[in-house]
Structures are given as structure tokens and as C-alpha cells.
Image (cartoon, coloured by chain):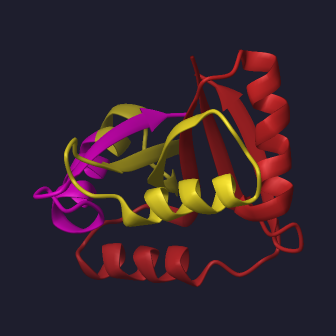
Chain colours: A yellow, B red
Amino acid sequence: MTVLEIRIELKKGVADPEGKNTKKTLESLGFKGINSVKTVKMFEIDTDMPADEAVRSAEEMCRKLLANPVIQNYRIDVR
Amino acid sequence: MTVLEIRIELKKGVADPEGKNTKKTLESLGFKGINSVKTVKMFEIDTDMPADEAVRSAEEMCRKLLANPVIQNYRIDVR
């Protein structure tokens, strides 16, 4: 009924080695003009719940399992 | 100048074990009403290029490095 997009990204200042290495590799392939590459993890969750309940549930999922609050921020969008 | 969001997801029919396991774990934590969990990988690329050039460049990045065309689809959005 509700499809949620949960976007989990590193907090400012937390190292993103995958992003850094992707940038380096792109540059070694000849791509120019790249200032930064950041990696973001996303979960698309298809639920049986109405939107408000699904978002509330997703908040809890992030706190309990999906995100690490020490180094990550999350954002929940309804699609 | 242009920030691109490159979204890389598995093609239909390709197994997503990480998504499946996330769903199982959420259910074991007591979450109900989840039909499916899908994982998506995203790159946020900050470039010096104008939007049209950045998108063209990003297409090439996906083909050459970021996506595996056998199992993944990509979508490029300008933010």
C-alpha cells in the first residue's frame, strides 16, 4: 500500500572511503571536473500500511536496525 | 556546479539477498506488514560541469564503472 524510500547517508565529517575510491577511479578513467563522490545506501520498503503508520514504523526500523546513529543520518520518503 | 544523483538498482528478477535478509530481520524484530525490502545503491556526484554535460558524463561513468549492465539498471537525476 505504501512504498517507502529510506535513504541512509554518512554524517558530515565521517570518512567515505568507497566514495573517495570511486572518485579516484573515475579520474583515472579520464573523467574530469568531479569535486566529490558520496555513497548513499537506500532501502525501498513496500508495506501494507497506510502512509502515516508506515513512516512511523520506518523511523523505528532505522533506529533499531537500518541506520547507525553514530555515523549515519536517515531520511524517510513516501513514494 | 551540478550535483548528480545516480541510482543503481538490481534488474527485475535478480536476487537481492541483502534486501531479503533485511526483511527477515525486521520481521524477527516484530515489524509487520512488510511486503518486500529492496536495496538500492546511490552515488552523489558533485561536478564542475553544467547539467547537460554532467548527465552525459554520468551516463558514461555508469557504463564504464558504476553499474553492472548484466544485473543493474541506473537512473541519473540532477539535484
Residue B44 screen position, x and y as percent: 53, 41
Q: Quadrant of residue A46?
A: bottom right
Instruction: From this view, report whether residue A66 is shown above or below residue A31.
Output: below
Residue A72 among those drawn in magenta? yes
Residue B59 screen position, x and y as percent: 84, 43
Instruction: From this view, report whether residue B25 is shown above or below residue A1.
Output: below
Region rendered in magenta: A56-79
Q: Quadrant of residue B6?
A: top right
How many numbered markers are drawn?
Answer: 0
- Name the residue furthest left: A70
Q: Quadrant of residue B63?
A: bottom right
Instruction: From this view, report whether residue B76 is shown above or below residue A60.
Output: above
Please state which of residues B77 and A20 is positioned toward the viewer in this rendering: A20
Residue A71 among those drawn in magenta? yes
Q: Is residue B10 visible?
A: no
Residue appearing at x 73%, y 45% in the figure: A31
Residue appearing at x 56%, y 59% in the figure: A24
Direction from residue A65 to residue A29 in the image, left or right: right
Residue appearing at x 80%, y 37% in the figure: B57
Direction from residue B45 to residue B50 in the image, left or right: right
Direction from residue A37 to residue A26 in the image, left or right: right
Residue A18 screen position, x and y as percent: 45, 65
Residue A61 screen position, x and y as percent: 26, 59
Please state which of residues B58 and A46 is positioned toward the viewer in this rendering: B58
Q: Quadrant of the N terminus of chain B?
A: top right
Residue appearing at x 76%, y 58% in the figure: A29
